[in-house]
Amino acid sequence: MDYQNRINTIRKYMDTTGADLFITTPDANTEYLTGIPRYGSGHTRERQHSIEYSCLTVTENSLKAFMPHLKTLIAKAKLGNTKTNVDFVPFPDGDTEGEALINELSAMGLKGKTAGVTNDVPAAFILLLQNRLNMNVINLNQAIYDMRSIKDPDEIKIMKEAVEITDNVYNALIDAIIPGASVRELEHYIDILIERFGGSQSSFEGELNVHGPKAGHFVGFSHDTIEKGYVLGLDFGLMYKGYCTDFGRTVFIGEPSQEHIKIYNTVKAAHHLSISLMDHYHNGEEIDCAARDAIENAGYGKSFIHKLGHSIGMDVHERPFLAKGENKNLENNMIFAVEPSIYIPKSCFIRLEDQVIVSPDGGIIMSKISHDIKVIG
């Protein structure tokens, strides 16, 4: 990864906005800009002592990572031989008021200057900049959105490998989906398969949505057992070398009804139509509308209850989206998760989801898993 080029790009954004300092959080943004692994390995937020004042700062002449001592040691060990010019500024766990940060920024001559921050910088952190350093704080989140939305060749290579691992997980999982199987046990099995095939962990809490007569009245309240006559909607993803996947397919338990076949083919047609439009001539709203119109024209418009898709990379949901309000045209080498669906309570949740690379000739599907109807049992 060319981390220096990424930092240089941030500095160009700073020049155009008048920011003297750029600050972001120790999550995927810091990992993207420096290679320093993000905090945590699960889906919960870490709240411990002075961790709120951990950050990455960029100025015209410096790049610094502020972290508690233990986090600094872990980060340096995980970085290994990764080439990054970041200077670490460790501080004690007992520094709950951000004194080390204030002292360092003051010594850098940043009192009264302008700080550009990303959206996840805590409110307490911003108040510290304003009240203790008299800094003007502006939102520079669009800079990191723009950078992360277009994947470079190294990122695309990693994400292709991640999708291949995801395909392997799906193929192994299919063998375990049999009538009578426990849905919860299958969801746990996904985590086992992710590690078996080379992923580090799940990228979000995956779900097997089993819908039919005994299912609940909402997508997340599915039946707890694989049964004939039910429809299984899979939604899971994994992490690999810091990047995410997000994958979905539909499996019929027993031969599907003619209505379910019609619904599946409607979703499939909307899926393929939207992917064909994923070039630099169309924006996210136009593509979402095209898929939505296709489903509406088939008579299921009210059953498509979410946006068409989202960008994906170091976070499973990134900007931009395939949704209303996204009026900027797509750009080559953006990667999206495209996921049209139709949900009918007590009947089915039918979906197709693929990661798709934007190209001049339309989207390129990364997965090798077939879109043909899949029947088990």
Image (spheres, grey):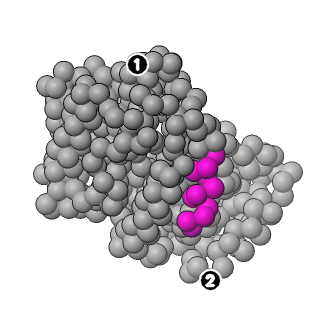
For disc 1, the marked residue is 345
- Residue 160 position within the rendered picture, expressed as x and y whole percent measured from the top left: 39, 66
What is the spatial separation of the Cα atoms under label 2 and label 1, in whole angstroms?
A: 52 Å
The part of the image, by quadrant, that contains residue 361 is bottom left
Looking at the image, residue 374 sits to the left or right of residue 99; the answer is left
Quarter where residue 211 is shown: top left
Q: Which residue lies furthest to the right in this view?
A: 94
Of the residues shown, which amino acid type is indicated by label 1?
A: Pro
Q: Does the magenta stretch include residue 189?
A: yes
The question of residue 32 being in magenta is answered with no
Residue 114's spot in the image, x, y percent? Answer: 51, 51
239 vs 207, nearest the viewer: 207
Which one is in front, 264 or 77? 264
The crowd level at tag 2 (other Cα within 10 Å; few <14, some 14-19, many 20+) is: few
As helix, strand or loop, the secondary structure at mark 2 comes to loop
Label 1 sits on a secondary structure element that is: loop
User: Which of label 2 and label 1 is nearer to you?
Assistant: 1
Q: Is residue 175 visible?
A: yes
Residue 301 position, x and y percent, is 23, 23
Q: Residue at x 41, y 28 (%)?
A: 229
Residue at 70% over, 50% down: 53
Q: Which of 368 and 102 is in front in this view?
A: 368
Residues drawn in magenta? 188-198
Q: Residue 81 carries which label?
A: 2
Direction from residue 146 to residue 93 in the image, left or right: right
Side of 186 where 343 appears, left or right = left
Residue, far front:
377
Q: Considering only order in the chain, which callout, 1 or 2, is on the residue closer to the N terminus?
A: 2
Prevailing secondary structure class for the magenta stretch in the rendered image? helix
